[in-house]
Amino acid sequence: MEHEEFNFDDIMAELQSQLYDTPAQAEPETPREPRQERREEIPAPKKPSAARRVGRFFARLAIFLVVTVLLIVTALYGVMYVIARGPSPSARDIFVMSVRETSAIGFLADLFFTEEEIAAIENKTEVEEYVETDTSLITITKPEDKTDESHEGEEVQGPAADEWGLVDEDGDGIIIEPVKGEGYSGYMMVVLDPSRVIMGSVPSSYGGRGYTVEQMVEQFDAVAGINAGGFEDPEGHGNGSIPNSMVVYEGKVYYESKGVQDGFVGIDSDYILHVGKLTSKDVQEKNIQYGVSFGPVLVSNGEACDVGTSGVNPRTAIGQRSDGAILMLVIDGRQVISLGATYQDMVDIFLEFGAVNACNLDGGSSSLMWYGGDYINNCASVIGIRPVPTTFLVLKEGGAGNE
């Protein structure tokens, strides 16, 4: 029996053929082309067009803004929830009163409380009945007739301070004093001659258009002014053309049927400021020339009024000292540096400045003071300066409002 000779290389080739399904004696593979040449055969990816890149940018920006707004809203909601439902009843009441005093964001209270709960909080404010203004407490003296008896016989350098410590530095009859307190800041304007103060309003435009404080100042050729009474403002979208309560302009009564809200303030023909719940009959009897409604009354006959609980908001108010000087106050609000003032804060400020009578006016986003060719306080409105139907203005020196 002959022995079959085996070749080791043939055996390995056969095994590879069975394992990898390749021919047992495959021809050597042709060397692959260099990778560089192969890459050149594949088309390069196209860059997106400029329009597409811009579209992607704005899409990402929109997503970022939406997420940011959602985070801010969520954070604000959390803060409001802690205040509204937290352990402090006073913080809760201030929150409810603050938002309910506004026409645009009053709905925020509804997010956390029922109507019954809101009514219970608001009913805690019980405003006292007002007494008739005692005109004998006001003695009006023309600025040129005022003398400083403490300096008689002495040579006085520059303008002297009045009995409230205020000085008319530039001699224009108007003093601007900054006011500051816990959580608020603003300005007090002291008009030494009350005959220069009128109510700026255009009754023929009621129901048609409102005027900004600046426009009222220009309309009446005045030098200073503040906003005055309230106006119809459904959901914060009113155009400031329709007063929401009784107005008196040049002795004529408008919107009597709408009442006087929490108080009325008016200036008679003798330049004395009256506060209270005046009716149209009272207006005629007291010869009121200019007046608006809002309230509450802050100071009456030299005494602080019980103003109850209120929110923290931008404020505007007007008052009068015993020498007849008119006091106009604005408080900034809804800002980091000045959240706003309560009614009690306003009472304290007016008493500090010697007010015999004072009344709160429309506040919030309408609170503005114009002087020296510009607004001197900050507007709280996010939509810009709001038009109003009524203002209190200061005429140029020599002008008289009731003549």
Image: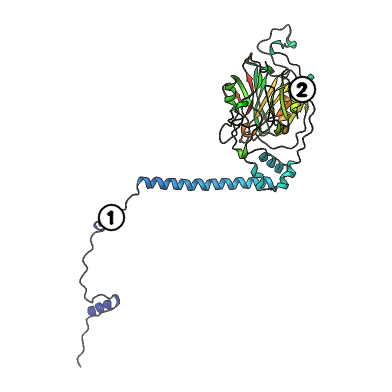
Q: Is residue 218 left or right of residue 131?
A: left
Q: Depth check: 138 or 354 in front?
A: 138
Q: Which numbered disc, 1 or 2, marks the residue that appears first in the sequence?
A: 1
Q: State whether residue 36 is above or below residue 330.
A: below
- Secondary structure of residue under mark 1: loop
Q: Is residue 99 left or right of residue 39?
A: right
Quadrant of res 183 = top right
- Secondary structure of residue under mark 2: helix
Q: In the rendered picture of this protein, how many numbered marks are placed on residues? A: 2
Way the structure is coloured: rainbow
The location of residue 142, given as percent across then percent down, is 70, 13
Residue receiving disc 1: 43
Quadrant of res 106 = top right
Image mark for residue 285: 2
Q: Do tag 1 and tag 2 residues touch (Cβ < 8 Å)? A: no
The location of residue 58, given as percent across then percent down, is 44, 45
Residue placed at 22% from the left, 73% from the top? 26
Task: Answer yes or no: is residue 141 visible.
Answer: yes
Residue lying furthest bottom: 1
